[in-house]
Image (cartoon, rainbow, N blue to C red):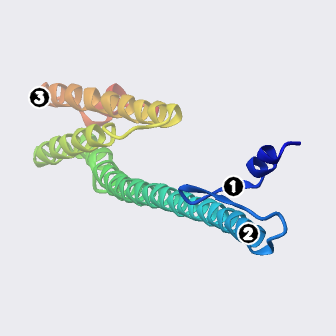
Amino acid sequence: MHAKDKNDNQHSMHGNSWEAIDPHDKTAKQVDLQDINKTKYLFKAALIGTATISLVFIIIIFGWLTYSRIANLQNDWKVFSKDASERTQILFHLKSALGYGGFIHNFKNYVMRQEPHLVKKIQHDLDLFYTHIDNYEKFSMTDQELKAIGQVRAVIDTYAEAFYRAQRLINKGITPQELDKNVRIDD
């Protein structure tokens, strides 16, 4: 090797200028190792920082998604609870409009006693029934519920027809026993 080549091999880039490096100079090697270790440390720190920021971002996203789902669940529960409460109230009103002291009870008394004051009560009970059943049908229902509501409505429609027929027959002077035979319903 030529002397010039030796000198070229003994130069290294430090900072912005070329300096001659003595191959036997341990300080220059230590500086190079320190630079390499510093670079490795900075790379690791940057990698850990990036991973930490990414993890925090992921936690925030999952936290927000969880919060949103819980908020939606709370809202769904409120709607469900409100619907269940309203359904229960409507069913109670339906039972009251139809049961003892309601439409069917008053209808049977009307057939047996033929008392004119019962006509208004019966008509009121019918109006209540149709109002409440119409309100109940506004809720979403299963096929089984739809079928049951349809059956109840059909029975009450049959009773309503019998009630109007009873009024006409009573106006013609029919006896309670004959009227009972003409308006009897197998429900």
Question: Could you say whether the residue bearing mark 2 is in a helix, strand or loop?
Answer: helix
Q: Which residue does the image show at 57% across and 59% down from the upper left?
A: 50
Question: Percent x, y for residue 120?
Answer: 11, 45
Question: Percent x, y for residue 181?
Answer: 36, 29
Query: Local crowd at mark 1 within 10 Å, few (<14), some, or many (≥20)?
Result: some
Query: Local crowd at mark 2 within 10 Å, few (<14), some, or many (≥20)?
Result: some
Pick whichever of labels 2 and 3 is earlier in the sequence.
2
- Callout in the foreground (2, 3): 2
114, 31: nearer the viewer: 31
13, 148: nearer the viewer: 13
- Give the amino acid type for the residue marked by disc 1 in the picture: Ser
Question: Could you say whether the residue bearing mark 1 is in a helix, strand or loop?
Answer: strand
- Give the amino acid type for the residue marked by disc 2 in the picture: Ala
Question: Percent x, y for residue 45?
Answer: 62, 66
Q: Which residue does the image show at 32% across and 44% down from the upper left?
A: 104
19 up-or-down from 1: above or below:
below
According to the picture, the residue beneath numbered tag 3 turns out to be: 171
Q: Is residue 42 visible?
A: yes
12 up-or-down from 130: above or below:
below
- Give the amino acid type for the residue marked by disc 3 in the picture: Asn
According to the picture, the residue beneath numbered tag 1 turns out to be: 12
> How far separated are the C-alphas under marks 1 and 3?
124 Å
Pick whichever of labels 1 and 3 is earlier in the sequence.
1
> How far separated are the C-alphas under marks 2 and 3?
125 Å
Q: Which residue does the image show at 65% across and 62% down from the upper left?
A: 39
Do tag 1 and tag 2 residues touch (Cβ < 8 Å)? yes
Question: Could you say whether the residue bearing mark 3 is in a helix, strand or loop?
Answer: helix
Q: Image quadrant for the N terminus? A: top right
According to the picture, the residue beneath numbered tag 2 turns out to be: 28
Q: Is residue 162 left or right of residue 75?
A: left
